[in-house]
Amino acid sequence: MNVQLRQLAALVAVADAGTFTEAATELGLSQAAVSRAIAGLEAVLGARLLQRTTRQVALTATGARVLPAARRVLEEVTHLERTVARQDQELRIGYAWAALGKHTRRLQRAWQSAHPGVPLVFVQSGTATAGLAEGVADVAVLRRPLDDDRFETTPIGSEARYAAVATDNALARRRSVRMAELARYTVALDSRTGTTTPGLWPPGGAPASTRESHGVDEWLTLIAAGQAVGVTSEATANQNPRPGVAYRAVRDAPPIEVRLAWWRDDPPPRLAELIALARSLISGR
């Protein structure tokens, strides 16, 4: 069996994007090249992985079983490359929606003062590990549980939750809102990287309808258009202003725990110092 990494990358890209066209754009390839990679993978495995129609592409039952394994292989190869090639030139911190909000710039400046030759670089990656598993980050800022033994995590603080509503919504005229008031609207959720789920509401009080979004930009676009409301972290409100969107504090929502994560078997240099500095800035000490 001769499975190639480019074939696995094509499968993951198509599964995530939903179309060959968007997958090709993501990979920087032609649509024909992506189609050939998928066809080659199916030939090697001897099974159909994708069900193609004129409107969409969907995983077959076999494809759904193969996809998680393909992700793991690509992640491990990326980790291998990163481990071998790492140079102590910069420290990259990944995040999915917001870095550290109002503390981001302060952390970068404090780090620069202490380590002028090692820039602290924040990189956005809309994955469950905020770029850690994909090799684009050395440390990740996480605001949701990470159930993966390959990674170590530690809390650095907590943040309040904020509602995001269209500026012409009646709730935008309020200084703060309650969860029950938000449940009257369609709530935009991002099940892959977001911090809000229907379980955030008490039993019997969950929103009547939800709408899936993919990343902070799509989430904000839905809200600005009045098609949904959202609940997010204080950092998102601080770091992602958007015309047409108003952020309001949520009075009765539990805070969000903020954690840093890294590869358990390959912690980056100066990790302890980074953790201590982040904690001190978030706590205000």
Image (cartoon, rainbow, N blue to C red):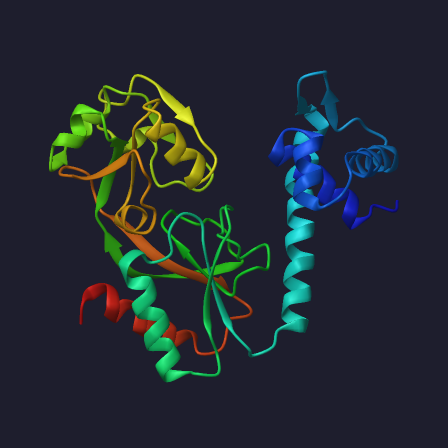
**Which percent across, then down, holds residue 102?**
27, 59
- Looking at the image, residue 116 lies above or below residue 98: below
- Looking at the image, residue 5 lies above or below residue 196: below
Q: Nearer the viewer, residue 31 or 186?
A: 31
Q: Quadrant of the C terminus?
A: bottom left
**Which percent across, then down, holds residue 201?**
24, 29
**Which percent across, then down, holds residue 95?**
44, 54
Residue at the image point whose x is 66% and y is 30% from the top: 64
Q: Quadrant of residue 216?
A: top left
Q: Quadrant of residue 32?
A: top right
Q: Specify whether 182 is left or right of 90.
A: left
**Which percent across, then down, holds residue 90?**
52, 74
On the question of residue 109 being in view, the answer is: yes
- Looking at the image, residue 15 lies above or below residue 129: above
**Most distant residue in the front direction:** 243
Residue at the image point whose x is 67% and y is 64% from the top: 80
